[in-house]
Image (cartoon, grey):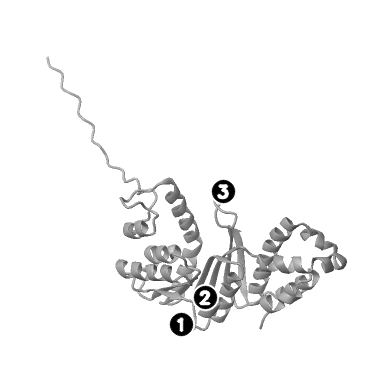
Amino acid sequence: MKRASPATPKTTFVDPLADVLRPGQSIELLKELHILTRDGKLNQDSRRKLKQVFHLCQFIEPLLDEVLGRQDTLTLADHGAGKSYLGFILYDLFLKARPGAHIYGIETRDELVEKSRDLAIRLGFDRMSFLNETVAESITAETLPAQIDIVTALHACNTATDDAIRFALAKQARHIVLVPCCQAEVAAVLRKHKNESFGKTPLSEIWRHPIHTREFGSQLTNVLRCLQLESHGYQITVTELVGWEHSMKNELIIATQTGSPRKNARDRLQQILQELNLQELETRFLGPQ
């Protein structure tokens, strides 16, 4: 008696991107942003980039939902947009089906602004605009609405983050998302007055050595920014954006307007500036109330 041949097992196709990409996510966009290769594959480096972007989106998505839960429109300004990775992915994942939402990418490099404009046209992302402006210039730019709901500034170097805060305050932003980078201004002022500070306070030992000046200056800058925002009625969350293995500039500051300024924030801020001999920075961090 002849034995029957065993049945050939069916091959089940498993999409290698299914466990990485979100439903409905634009493959063409990810290719254009070089997150996917031209043939639609994901290498280790691009997988890391995508993981970082999704990690940040997890923090921003609830802010989008909060604004759109209160009103039918939403405006988001992304400062130092670069290639507009963040803006494009936020639009693709969360806002392309929301007709009242508009994203503004603000960037100073002409070629990146033009590329972003061209890409938005090709993808049909018609509620994305790109401005060739500095962060400071954008505060008075007539091409932007008087009020912006959400302001983001990722790795805006040195005082560009402070300009983004000024922009957000001027535009009465509901939410602010900051990943500060290369904070050099406070460290420079600490260094400038180091000798005077030695005679004024023993705390000057904290920034006695150059490497400590740099690191303490960076940390202090973000502390001052948080106090500044709290004095204007924002509730602050400070957390880690990604693991240390990816970036040393990974502090994420999220500010949400509550309308209730922290009572002693402005006084604390002023006291810190005086104690550490940083009075010349009062205009930047205190400014008009």
Among the two numbered marks 3 and 1 on one chain, the one whose residue lies closer to the N terminus: 1
Give the side of residue 194 with respect to residue 16, left or right: right
Residue carrying label 2: 134
Q: Residues within 10 Å of mark 2 (few under 14, many from 20)?
A: some
Q: Is residue 148 above or below residue 199?
A: below
Residue drawn at x 72%, y 56% is: 211
Residue 160: image location, x then y, percent: 58, 71
Along the horizontal axis of the image, is 207 left or right of 136? right
Numbered tag placed on residue 145 in the rendering? 1
Name the residue that disc number 3 marks: 245
Nearer to us: label 3 or label 1: 3
Q: Position of residue 269 (x, y in %)?
A: 73, 73
Mark 2: which secondary structure?
loop
Q: Amino acid at mark 2?
A: Thr
Residue furthest to the left in view is 1
Q: What residue do we see at 34% from left, 67% from top?
A: 119
Q: Secondary structure at mark 3?
A: loop
Is residue 74 rendered to the left or right of residue 223? left
Image point (67%, 62%), residue name: 218
Q: Position of residue 212 (x, y in %)?
A: 73, 57
Amino acid type of the residue tagged 1 in the rendering? Pro
